[in-house]
Image (tube, rainbow, N blue to C red):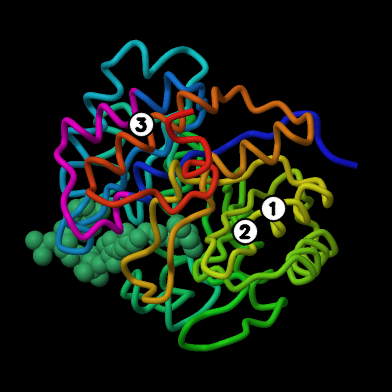
Amino acid sequence: GLPERVFIHEVGARDGLQNESGVVPTEAKIEFVRRLARAGLRTIEVTSFVPPKWVPQLADAAEVFAAVRADVEIAAADRRLPVLVPNERGFDRAVELGADRIAVFGSATETFARRNLNRTVAESLAMFAPVVERAGAAGIDTRGYLSMCWGDPWEGPVPLDRVVRVGKALVEMGCSQLSLGDTIGAATPGHVTALLTAFAEAGVPASRIAVHFHDSYGQALANTLAALRFGVTTVDASAGGLGGCPYAESATGNLATEDLVWMLHGLGIETGVDLGALVATSAWMADLLGRPSPSRAVQALIGK
Ligand code: HMG
Ligand code: MG
């Protein structure tokens, strides 16, 4: 069976804009989040509190997050505004500005852990542990991302048991939700089901899992459907299909939120999203970036 409702975790402002070669003006980022909120997205990942040296595109994290939090329309009662935090320094920066939802982000592979976090997998888990503990003590919810779950551009295929071991460590540390990242878009539906089965057998049920697909090979929607059939109800997506990861060379855009919403609404699954308003938002952002949105649904619906 399929769920009646799917929770969309919108990552365009973070995963999308972190990968743009041009820097989007701070005011435009804030306006982007405002438009996403107006389009009905309940969970909008805003930015990352990482060193500007690592992700210059998000150097204005504090300014963007403070403005978004202060905007009553965006920060409506049931809106969730998570931010990425790699370490205690990032946690302090985020909490000072009132963050009440954070995400740490680990890797299933050693190569990507080194490139993205300058740490081994074990060292990165050790870096996250005090963050998750302090968050828990302060009543702050922590999501755990796990990258390279279905393949790594340097290491190739990633054994299921390795992914499960690192993912389980994040859950046991206190992450309320585990977002499984197909960072390079290599997953196919059978492989999705195999990994979710391995997690379920290891005691991490689909209800604790979110899926984060990139669309490099055009598999993101098929993979999403496989995950929904398995009982997953939270899906990460990026408005207009913006995004990628600056530290994973072959990563292209995330699953476009519009493509996801078109499929879900066609299946009679509720999302709370106004597709027309979302398409208009992505068209506006595409104009700003000076290139068309890669989303098929945006291309089909634009101007309609
Ligand atoms: P490092 O260089 O080893 O850090 O980076 P460090 O602890 O040695 O500190 C170096 C300097 O940075 C120090 O300053 C720190 O104070 C400062 P200095 O003494 O030289 O003046 N510093 C900070 N400043 C601001 N905010 C902070 C912070 N931390 C230290 N939080 C580190 C280690 C983990 C910080 C770095 O590797 C990092 O931030 N990496 C993140 C890269 C990133 O954001 N990647 C993209 C997100 S992951 C992703 O997109 C995948 C995902 O979408 C899922 C999927 O698709 O797979 C989530
Ligand atoms: Mg990503």
State the residue at coordinates (16%, 50%).
Answer: 23
Marks 2,1: beta carbons within 8 A: yes
Amino acid type, callout 2: Ala
Mark 3, secondary structure of its residue? loop
Asked which secondary structure carries label 1, the reply is helix
Specify which label sits upstream in the sequence, 2 or 3.
3
| Quadrant housing residue 252 | bottom left
Q: Determine if residue 129 is in view.
A: no
Judge: label 3 CB < 8 Å from ligand 1.
no
Q: Residues within 10 Å of mark 3 (few under 14, many from 20)?
A: many
- Kindly give the residue lying farthest to the bottom in the view shown: 155
Q: Which residues are magenta?
A: 17-34
Give the residue drawn at x 75%, y 71%: 191
Q: Which mark is residue 99?
A: 3
Query: Which label sits on residue 220?
Result: 2
Q: Is residue 28 magenta?
A: yes
Q: Which mark is residue 224?
A: 1
The earlier-in-sequence mark between 1 and 3 is 3
> Can residue 139 be seen from the camera position used here?
yes
**Residue 49 percent across, percent down from the top left:** 27, 47
Query: In the image, is residue 283 above or below residue 220?
Result: above
